[in-house]
Image (cartoon, helix red, strand yellow):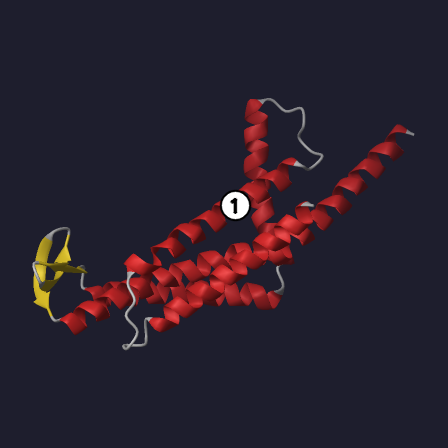
Amino acid sequence: MRCVVTKLLGWLCLWLFAVCVVVHVLTFVPSVPISMGSTWPLHVLTLAACGVMVVFMNRLQRSRNTARELDTLGRWRTSQQKSRETFAEIRAITPRGLYLAQTALGMYLVINFVVFIALMGSGSPEFSGGKFYLSNHGHVIREITESEFHRYEAYEVRGFSGHWMFFAMIPAVYFLVVEERLKEKYRREDGGDEDRSSGAVV
């Protein structure tokens, strides 16, 4: 049953990633009005997707047949060690093509955000009193035209959607590819530990 849930989550995250890509591309089309007001649910959904992924990762760690009888400090240390090991394992078992795609998207995220900061000029578009402004925390930087206003709105969405794409892709890859490989790896390792323990007892 959990395998079905994992795959369903994976496909939902993949759908979310595709929507984020479409939204990001639309910010480069001047004739398409787009703003944070109409796209903010993607921000919430990508954060939720990553949160669910973390929950599943923690549950998978706790299901292992190790460190059952440690004290509180011992459990904390083991948890930290497991987290580091898990991320290393995820990197190792992620298909090379997907890992390179994630790396490339991460690099694009950084470049896109730097360009976003440069384009926005430390301000954000606002409409008040029938006029369009570029402002920073209530301080008006300058008055802008309506076309500039829509362009700056698109810049805002472009800056955020670069992050949305990345944080939708990560859980999509985890749920569709990585988790099942991790579970299989853990089953082999835990099974081997049990066989060695049985042999030692005999």
Quarter of image, res 126: bottom left
Instruction: Please tell me which residue is depicted at 88% across the width and 28% down the height of the picture.
Output: 201
Image position, residue 142 (x, y; %) = 8, 64
Instruction: Please tell me which residue is depicted at 41% across the width and 59% down the height of the picture.
Output: 164
Per the image, the residue denoted by label 1 is 52
In this view, the residue in front, 147 or 189, is 147
* 168 sits to left or right of 155: right
| Amino acid bearing label 1 | Val
In this view, the residue in front, 64 or 47, is 47
Residue that protrudes farthest toward the top in the picture: 71
Image position, residue 5 (x, y; %) = 63, 49
> How many numbered circles does the render carry?
1
Instruction: Please tell me which residue is depicted at 9% across the width and 60% down the height of the picture.
Output: 141
Image position, residue 48 (x, y; %) = 46, 47
In this view, the residue in front, 82 or 15, is 15
Mark 1: few, some, or many residues within 10 Å (few <14, many ≥20)?
some
Q: Secondary structure at mark 1?
A: helix
* 45 sits to left or right of 183: left
Instruction: Please tell me which residue is depicted at 15% across the width and 70% down the height of the picture.
Output: 146
Residue that protrudes farthest toward the front in the picture: 130
Q: Is residue 92 visible?
A: no
* 92 sits to left or right of 186: left
* 108 sits to left or right of 13: left
Residue that protrudes farthest toward the right in the picture: 202
Answer above or below: position of 170 versus 116.
above
In this view, the residue in front, 58 or 91, is 58
Q: Is residue 111 visible?
A: yes
